[in-house]
Image (cartoon, coloured by chain):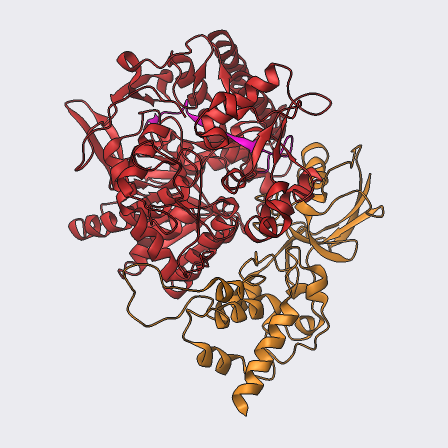
Chain colours: A red, B orange
Amino acid sequence: MIPKRTFDAVIVGGGGAGLRAALQMAEADLKVAVLSKVFPTRSHTVSAQGGITAALGNVSEDDWHWHMYDTVKGSDYLGDQDAIEFMCRNAPSAVYELEHMGLPFSRLPNGKIYQRQFGGQSKNFGGEQAVRTCAAADRTGHALLHTLYQRNIAARTQIFEEFYAVDLIRDAEGYILGVVALEIETGQPWLFESRVTVLATGGGARIFRHSTNAHINSGDGLGMVLRAGLPLEDMEFWQFHPTGIPEVGSLITEGVRGEGGYLLNKDGERFMLRYAPNAHDLASRDVVSRAIAQEILAGRGCGPHGDFVYLKIDHIGADKIKQRLPGIRELSMQFAGVDPCEGPIPVTPTAHYMMGGIPTNLNAQVVIPERFGPEEAVPGLYAIGECACVSVHGANRLGGNSLLDLVVFGRAAGNHAIEYLKENPIPRTLPADAAEPALARLARWDKPEGSERVPQLRAEMQRILQEHCGVYRREDLLKEGINKLDQVEKRLPDAALDDRSKVFNTARLEALELENLLPIARATLVSAQARTESRGAHTREDYPKRDDDRWLRHTLYHRENDQLDYKPVRLKPLTVETFQPKERTY
Amino acid sequence: MKFRIYRYDPESGAKPHMQNYEIDFDPKGKKVLDALIAIKETQDESLSFRRSCREGVCGSDGFNVNGLNCLACVTALEGLKEPIEIRPLPRLAVIRDLIVDMGQFYQHYKAVKPYLINLDPEPESERLQSPEDRAELDGLYECILCGCCTTSCPSFWWNPDKFLGPAALLQAYRFIADTRDQATDERLDYLEDPYRLFRCHGIMSCVEVCPKGLNPTQAIGKIKTLLVKRSI
């Protein structure tokens, strides 16, 4: 038997979504625990830069309905319109709430929250550029994460720092009863029993070789869900951010272009004028990333290998750069060796964000297809933030909508869980062998013999995804990618650790993380191969058109036999009229 | 490249020691963290350290490199004297290798009530704050809690349990300086103590090492000024 702790709710992940949900429940006097594999302010939310989008109208007239339109269009009509309405409608109050909590937003001369332009934003349903993204300089994620952590200190939320969740506990009737987690400092497994479990484990773009994501972004919640026999939604949709620093991967915020920056090819041409005659450099991210990839393919890339383009911002003046983009200046000088006050920053499309994830509904409950109905909630299980697919981002997320997603659905999950706990006051009986599968998973890495090593397998997986499932995809490439990944997965059972110690064994953590990354990589390739159309961030060279007749639907990937199911896009919003799919131009 | 890295494995029973590593690594454009990862992946899986964002914003990988506290992920290898000596942050208990127990550091942070205190009813929209008032928070709110400053402070070394240290004091001032906060008196009451605040002697090691270019000594000075002003 392993030691056990009991809570009303356990939240796995201490980033923006997890901490927002925790706060909601802690302030309702629930007994809530946050398990985080890193100290919460080390979570990847901290790296978000440009801002959080909400139609406050502080700079120019705005309306949540316009924000909704842009988000639906940005999603290439794959986003569920009820969820998008819910998010955009709730955005202003969610942002004001953050301000009330103490988030140090930058300010306009009249004292209101500063807002900047971001990609894909328009007034009046496709009209002129809107100014909608609320910012704390270019450190909005840092400011948001620290503020939420600070509020959780005030609310006395119990945070288990450096606890790594291994697997969900699911009983025979399908109820989720908590998780097994590893105390990293001691190597001790613990059983966390709870009537509500919230997955807030973030993204998994570390399946790619070049990624803006932190090392810790291994999609742990997705691995747990697949092992529990539940599906993942829309895993073919990964956002390649147009402006990552080549090789290093560090993100250069879209806010640089929002503040007046633009892209140049090796001839010094502002090529976005050609690709997006209206929005130019502030077109949607998928559009800009494809444009950069096209320029590079056409031999107009910069540098000795012609493999990046330049992002120019020095023309707005050093003072503005230092005031509004201080973090970018720091990153650019440290990782690209360029002071953006003086010269352009080299950038290239870089894997950034997972639009897909664990399927959820408006209450952030995890949902599965039901044989005789549309879908049903998995009792006791929620998912929020990047690990979830609700789906507000559809086939392509707009900048500034991810931080919004965290707080809106973090709060929604908290609110619904409070009700769920009232309706389900009695804990269900924990099966005697509840922890066994998780403990077996841990024990597997204690075996001494094995010819394979974790870092090698991980590097090969990352190379496969980078080469076979990048900005542009093709049937033969994807098929070959799956075959290659098969080979890597076959070698996993032969992998072993040299270091099998207990105390803060980071090699073991990396092994457990690889066990989550590999199935995510597989879900991505399989889902991408099946979707024979181009939509949003999923671009098929062999199927260059969007095909609404066949593909206006979400993919559901099941681990068993790589089975794919589909479910319809929810085109009906909560109160307003449907935005009918139409051709998407910027 | 040659490295000398602090090793401690509590399960082995052996005492802490320095271990030499040599790797074939082109330092051009690379950081100390890149080298640590390369050593771990190719030579010694047991070498243990924390890391997350690898771009200087999460604050996981504060170490002591060639005698100076820094973030490994933003510290360039080029220009560092070899063998590059990497040790855990000073004065904190070592859990394993470069991983220290940050518990006390976090306790000090929590002790200054690092959250906005404003008991007025919340308005319908945002509270207003002028850009000038907001600018007072620049150089304060950016702290990443890496611990480089506090563990480089001789006053902290002497009284780690009683002196709050530069990181916590910087955050104390971040809320004092916020025009939206209403608890300045309460905050100053807590800080008016021979140890919590007044162990700072302006040595400025914190300023020297802060990877974000922040100035805790200046913030501490401002708190002291407020205390003096309050007493007259």
Which sits in the foreground, A83 or A489?
A83
Q: Quadrant of the C terminus of chain A?
A: top left
- Tell which residue pokes out farthest to the bottom in this image: B232
Queried whether the magenta region covers residue B87, the answer comes back as: no
Q: Which residues are magenta?
A: A231-250
The reply, left or right, for residue B146 in relation to residue A146 is right
Q: Exactly how many numbered labels are in the figure?
A: 0
Q: Residue at x 30, y 33 (%)?
A: A125
The reply, left or right, for residue B66 in relation to residue A370 is right
Which sits in the foreground, A171 or A337?
A337
Which of the 4 image quarters holds residue B204? Answer: bottom right
Residue A229 in the image: above or below residue B34: above
Could you say where residue A298 lies in the image, as x and y percent from the top left?
61, 14
Could you say where residue B218 lies in the image, as x and y percent from the top left?
64, 71
* Residue B152 seen in the current view: no
Could you say where residue A411 lies in the image, as x and y percent from the top left?
30, 50
Which sits in the foreground, B132 or A211?
B132
* Residue A274 seen in the current view: yes
Could you say where residue A27 lies in the image, as x and y percent from the top left?
30, 61
Residue A303 in the image: above or below residue A576: above
Which of the 4 image quarters holds residue A581? Answer: top left
The reply, left or right, for residue B209 in relation to residue B79 is left
Residue A510 in the image: above or below residue A188: above
Queried whether the magenta region covers residue A233, the answer comes back as: yes
